[in-house]
Image (tube, helix red, strand yellow):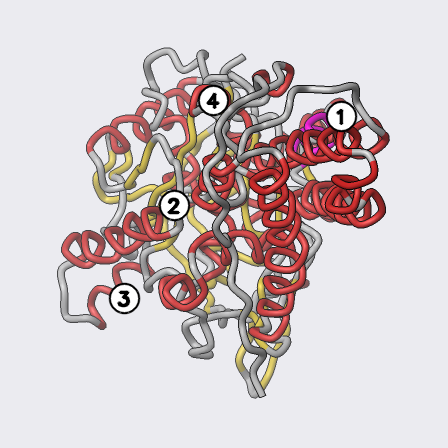
């Protein structure tokens, strides 16, 4: 079955930070896993380039909006390379194909009777590109603020509206029929509570700025940036042509601050246009720095490029998805990163691989022993590991998938210590060789299921294990490697780092 995974398209008002890398890495792991399972995958990321906020950022930089977008969008495209991301597509909302898709969707909504012309008055946050109700606002020093912390201003202008108020019961019914549409469950409860409180018709055009997709038949209006932005997910598949091969999307991965747009507005737009909603929207938490969200205004964003330069790509990929239960907020700490890399990668996995492969070099003439009967380690911790990891990833539980893998690694370390194959060489050499073969088989499975998280390092480990390129997938794990395979001398894959003072 074809699979479709997306990141949100990232807003180009500033350069990317580690939060952007986090979202993209999560989707990259999903895409890589399903490719390893033999499925056809389309993985999309890109940039959101319209709206008042971008227009203002370009003016502040003394640049034309398009030139500004070209520059910042390239930084996000470069980030996919820096982070080793395997995306199949990269979309920009300034592309002609996106204008065509947005205007086709508008015409469809209009033809179906879901759009009308009126005027809007309300509290608007330029930073969020969103309107808020009076009951959602707070006030400090005479300034009103949205729940996100963005200042709001009262605006009044002509506007086209989408009849969102007609979709409350339909959305609630959809949520009930598809309980895993919004994950984690706590976010689902938030969305349902918001919808139950009553939906207002949604303003979907602006006349106060011009940097956007023109409304078909009324060039005085540009489309509301969220209608424009959300359409990217079907633009990339060729809408208004047939998109059924990959649609509906399997997972839209988003930050929790944009869940409402994806879980309320987007399914309503789609159903109103006679299209199926996505199968899931997963809203993850934020990385914070000393308890504060990373932001341009606070100047506390972590540059993922510098992080990779210092610690290495796979180490950063691993830490970001290992440290915090996915879906929750997490506070970034260099000390925690180093401790995690030292204890789990260097001491646990690295030590297991080095001990096993060094013993095979010395005790088995550097050749893989013949396959034997499964032992307790295999039966209890390794045989079902790919299924367990797959089940966790199906629910976007990256932290749980990694914990299952490292539980198996810990068990393998206990096993090699208890069995002591270095001692068995003298007392029971046949048993010693069987233990080493079992540990090699375990490492093969462990390295394979870790490929989506650490593709380069696990490729190097599989090289040392002698696993051919065409056997580095989930189905191949059912076929044992032949005995007698020559193995190269092992080399350390992870380095230990000094903790900061």
Of callouts 3 and 2, which one flags the residue occurring earlier in the amino acid sequence?
3
Q: Name the residue: 30% across, 50% down.
A: 50
Q: Name the residue: 55% across, 67% down.
A: 496
Residue 334 belongs to magenta span: no
Look at the numbered disc 2 and give the secondary structure of its residue. loop
Q: Which residues are magenta?
A: 386-395
Of callouts 1 and 2, which one flags the residue occurring earlier in the amino acid sequence?
2
Nearer to us: label 1 or label 2: 1
Q: Which mark is residue 84?
A: 2
Q: Nearer the viewer, residue 111 or 494?
A: 494
Between the residue at mark 3 and the residue at mark 2, the CA separation in whole angstroms equals: 29 Å
Q: Main secondary structure of the magenta part?
A: helix
Callout 3 crowding tier (Cα within 10 Å): few <14, some 14–19, many ≥20:
some
Nearer to us: label 1 or label 4: 1
Classify residue 245 as left or right of residue 346. left
Between the residue at mark 1 and the residue at mark 4, the CA separation in whole angstroms equals: 55 Å
Q: Name the residue: 66% across, 29% down.
A: 441
Between the residue at mark 3 and the residue at mark 4, the CA separation in whole angstroms equals: 36 Å
Q: Nearer the viewer, residue 329 or 411?
A: 411
Between the residue at mark 4 and the residue at mark 2, the CA separation in whole angstroms equals: 45 Å
Classify residue 14 as left or right of residue 282. left
Callout 2 crowding tier (Cα within 10 Å): few <14, some 14–19, many ≥20:
some
Callout 4 crowding tier (Cα within 10 Å): few <14, some 14–19, many ≥20:
few
> In which quadrant will I find the N terminus?
top right
Look at the numbered disc 1 and give the secondary structure of its residue. loop
Of callouts 4 and 2, which one flags the residue occurring earlier in the amino acid sequence?
2
Q: Are marks 3 and 1 in contact (CB under 8 Å)?
A: no
| Residue 407 seen | no
Of callouts 3 and 4, which one flags the residue occurring earlier in the amino acid sequence?
3
Q: Name the residue: 45% across, 70% down.
A: 302
């Amino acid at each position: 079955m074809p699979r479709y995974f997306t990141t949100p398209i990232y807003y180009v008002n500033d350069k990317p930070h580690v939060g952007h890398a986090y979202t993209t890495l999560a989707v990259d792991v999903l895409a890589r896993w399903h490719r390893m399972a033999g499925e056809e995958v389309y993985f999309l990321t890109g940039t959101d380039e319209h709206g008042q906020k971008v227009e203002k950022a370009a003016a502040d930089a003394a640049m034309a909006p398009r030139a500004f977008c070209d520059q910042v969008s390239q930084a996000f495209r470069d980030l996919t390379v820096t982070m080793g991301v395997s995306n199949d597509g990269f979309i920009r909302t300034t592309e002609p194909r996106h204008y065509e898709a947005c205007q086709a969707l508008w015409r469809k909504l209009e033809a179906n009777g879901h759009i009308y012309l009126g005027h809007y008055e309300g509290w608007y946050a330029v930073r969020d590109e969103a309107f808020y109700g009076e009951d959602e606002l707070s006030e400090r020093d005479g300034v009103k603020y949205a729940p996100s912390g963005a200042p709001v201003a009262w605006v009044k202008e002509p506007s086209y509206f989408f009849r969102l108020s007609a979709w409350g019961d339909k959305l609630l019914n959809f949520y009930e029929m598809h309980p895993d549409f919004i994950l984690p469950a706590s976010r689902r409860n938030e969305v349902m509570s918001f919808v139950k409180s009553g939906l207002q018709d949604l303003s979907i055009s602006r006349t106060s700025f011009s940097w956007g997709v023109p409304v078909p038949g009324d060039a005085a209006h540009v489309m509301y940036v969220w209608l424009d932005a959300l359409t990217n997910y079907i633009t990339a598949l060729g809408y208004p042509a047939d998109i059924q091969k990959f649609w509906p999307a399997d997972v839209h991965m988003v930050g929790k601050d944009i869940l409402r747009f994806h879980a309320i507005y987007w399914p309503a737009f789609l159903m109103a246009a006679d299209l199926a909603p996505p199968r899931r929207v997963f809203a993850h938490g934020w990385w914070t720095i000393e308890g504060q969200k990373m932001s341009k205004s606070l100047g506390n964003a972590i540059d993922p490029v510098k992080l990779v330069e210092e610690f290495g790509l796979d180490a950063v990929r691993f830490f970001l998805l290992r440290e915090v239960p996915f879906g929750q907020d997490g506070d970034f700490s260099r000390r925690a990163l180093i401790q995690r890399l030292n204890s789990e990668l260097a001491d646990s996995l690295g030590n297991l691989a080095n001990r096993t492969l060094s013993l095979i070099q010395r005790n088995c003439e550097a050749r893989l022993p013949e396959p034997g009967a499964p032992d307790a380690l295999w039966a209890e911790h390794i045989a079902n590991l790919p299924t367990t990891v797959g089940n966790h990833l199906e629910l976007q539980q990256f932290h749980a998938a990694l914990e299952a893998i490292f539980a198996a690694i810990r068990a393998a370390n206990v096993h090699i210590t208890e069995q002591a194959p270095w001692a068995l060489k003298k007392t029971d050499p046949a048993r010693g060789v069987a233990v080493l073969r079992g540990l090699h088989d375990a490492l093969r499975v462990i390295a394979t299921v870790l490929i989506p998280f650490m593709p380069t390092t696990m490729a190097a480990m599989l090289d040392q294990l002698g696993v051919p390129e065409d056997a580095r997938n989930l189905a191949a794990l059912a076929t044992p490697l032949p005995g007698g395979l020559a193995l190269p001398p092992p080399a350390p894959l992870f380095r230990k780092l000094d903790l900061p003072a």
